[in-house]
Amino acid sequence: MMNKKKTNSMASFKRLIKTIFSFYPVLLPIVIVAIILNAVISTLPSIFMQNIIAIITDALNNQITWAEVAPKVYRFVAILLVLYVIALSASLFYQRKMADITQGSLCKFRIKMFSNMQTLPIRYFDTNPHGDIMSVYTNDTDTLRQLIGQSLPQMLTMMLTVTSIVCIMLYYSIILTVCVLLGVVIMVQITRKIGGQSAKYFVQQQIALGESEGFIEEMMNGQKVVKVFNHEAEAIADFDKVNDHWADMAEKANRNANILGPILHNMGNIMYVFVAIIGGLLLLLKAPNPNISGLPLSVAIIVPFLSMTRQFAGNIGSFSQQINSIIMGLAGAERIFELLDQEPEKDEGYVTLVNVKEENGELIEVSERTGIWAWKHPHKDGTITYHKLVGDIEVENVDFSYNPGKQILYDVTLYAEPGTKVAFVGATGAGKTTITNLINRFYDINAGKIRYDFINIDKIKKQDLRRSLGVVLQETNLFTGTVMDNIRYGRLDATDEECIDAAKLAGAHDFIIRLPEGYQTHLTNNGSNLSQGQCQLLAIARAAVADPPVMILDEATSSIDTRTEAIVSAGMDRLMEGRTVFVIAHRLSTVRNSDIIMVLDHGVIIERGTHLELLATKGQYYQLYTGAFELE
C-alpha cells in the first residue's frame, strides 16, 4: 500500500510541475534561472574565503606586508560584493514572481476543477459528500500555496546548493567530503523513517478533514431536523468521533514532523564537530589530501570546509522543515487531480436542437429565436433532415438499476403523445422520479429504448435534450442574486417582460411585487428570506420562461398550501396547454385531470388509465384515492 502511495505521490508531483509549467511557460523558466543564480552564488563565499585565508597565511609565513596583499584581498571582496548584489536581486525577483505564480496557479486550478465539475454526471454528486468536494476547493487547494510558493523553491535551492557544495568539497578534500556524506546518509535515513510516518498521517489528516467538513455541512443543512427531534447531544457525540479522528491524525502527523527538525539540526552540529576533529587530525599527522585541486591540506582549506559543512547541514535542515508542506501539498494535489480526472458525462449524441421557420411547408434553420424548434439529424450519407419538435415521448421495455444487482425499474413501457398529461402515482421509492431522470438522461438505461419524437435519445446531444425539457423539482434551488435573475435562469436571453409574464403564469407575480424591492429583491442562502411555497412558485416561473415543449413536474406543488395551489392551478393549466407533461404527485387531487395515470409499485407499472377508468377497476388507485390505503 505504501509503495502505491509513493507512486501516486511521485506521479502527482510530476503532474503538478508539468501543470504549473503549462500555466506559466515563459515566466516560470525565468524564475528558475533566478533561483539557480541565487543558489550557486550562495556557495561561492567558501572559495573566496579559502583564497583570502591562503593569501594572508602566505603573507604571514613569508613576512609580506599588508600593503602588498591588500589589493588581492580587496579584489576578492569586491567581486564577492558584486555577486551578493546579483544574488540579492535574483532572490527579490524570484520571490516576488513566485507569489504571482502561486496565487495564479491556485486560481487556475480552481477554475479547472469547477469547469470539470460542470461536466460530471449526477451520479458523482449522489455518491460523494458535498462537504468533501468543497474541501478540495478550499483546504486541498490551500495546501498547494505553501508547496508552490515556498517548498518547491526551497527544494530546488537545496538541491543546487548541496550539489555545488559537494563539488567544491571534492575539489578541496575527498576524505573530508566522505566524512560529510556519511553524516548525510544518516540524516537521509532519519528523514525517510520519520518523514515516511509523517507522510502517512498527513494524507490521513486531509481525508479526515474532508470527512469532518462533510459532516458539518450535513448537520447545517439538517439543523431543523436535529432540533425538532432533540438530536443535539447525539449530533455532538457523532461530531466528537469525527473530530477526534481528525485531531488524532493531525497530532501524529505533526508529532513526527516536529521532531525531525531538531534531530537534523543536532545531527548537523555533530557532523560539524566530526569534520573539525578529522580535519585537525589529518592536519597534525600531515596526512595526504587526495582532491581535484592538488592543494595540500591546510588551515585555508579546513576553515572554509567547516563553513561549507554547516551550510550543507543547514540546507538539509531547512528543507526538512518543508517536508510537512510538501507532504500535505502532494496529498492535496492527489485529491485535486482525482477530481480533475473524474470521467465526464458521456455524450455520444449527434442530433441537435435548432431554431427553425416554416417556408412552403419546409423547415429552414435560422439563428434567431422563432419559437419553433426542430431536431437537426445528420446522416451517414451526408444529408441532414429536420424533424419538428412536438414532444412525443415513448418508453419501451426499460429496465434500470442505480447499482448492479439492485434493479429499480422492470420492463417499463409508456407512451406520451404530444400535448398529453401523464401522471405517475405510487409510494415513495416506487420509481416515479427515476423515470423522469432517465428521460433527462441523468442516468442511462440498462435495457430497452426511450424515443423522443421517434429519435432514440441516445442519439440526441444531452445539452439539447435537456434544453427541450422544463423541470420543476420537489426540492427548489434558488441562487444568490435577484428574483429576476432566478427566473431568467430558465432562459438567459429572456427579457424582463417575458420573466414577469412567466411569474404571472405561475402565480408568483402577486407576492413578488410585495417584496421590499420587487423583482430586484436580492435572494441568498437558497431563498431563505422566502417561504417554501414562494420558492416553489419561483421554480415554476423559471420553468415557464424556458417555454419548453415538454414539462416534468416532480411534486411541483408539494410545498404549496391548498389556497395557493388553487391560484397556481389556472396558471399551470395554461403552462401545460399544448405541451407534453409528466406529473409526479402524492396529492391525488393534482392528477385527476391527467390524460393517463400510471400507478407504480416497486418499479413496475401495475395500473394505467384515466382517473375514472382506474376508479372503475377498484384496484390500488381506487384504494389510494378513497383512503383505504395511504399513498406512502
Image: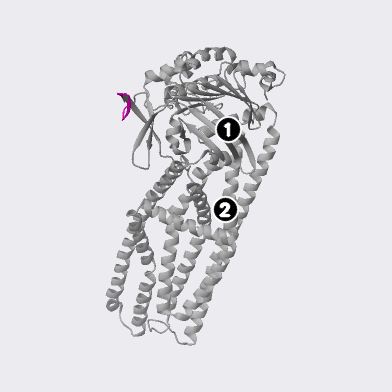
What kind of element bears circle 2?
Answer: helix
- Residue at the (46%, 16%) spot, across then down: 505
User: Which stretch did the figure color magenta?
Assistant: 359-368
Q: Nearer the viewer, residue 273 or 595?
A: 595
- Residue at the (55%, 19%) spot, across then down: 595
Rendering coords of residue 443 (x, y %) = 53, 38
* Rendered image: mark on residue 210: none
Please tell me how crowded label 1 is: few (under 14), some (14-19), or many (20+) other residues with Cα within 10 Å.
some
The residue beneath circle 2 is: 203
What quarter of the picture does the N terminus occupy? bottom right
Question: Which quadrant holds residue 348?
Answer: top left
What kind of element bears circle 1?
Answer: helix
Q: Is residue 516 visible?
A: no
Rendering coords of residue 317 (x, y %) = 51, 63
Q: Nearer the viewer, residue 9 or 579?
A: 579
Label 2 or label 1, whichever lies nearer to me, is 1
The residue beneath circle 1 is: 434
Q: Is residue 442 above or below residue 52?
A: above
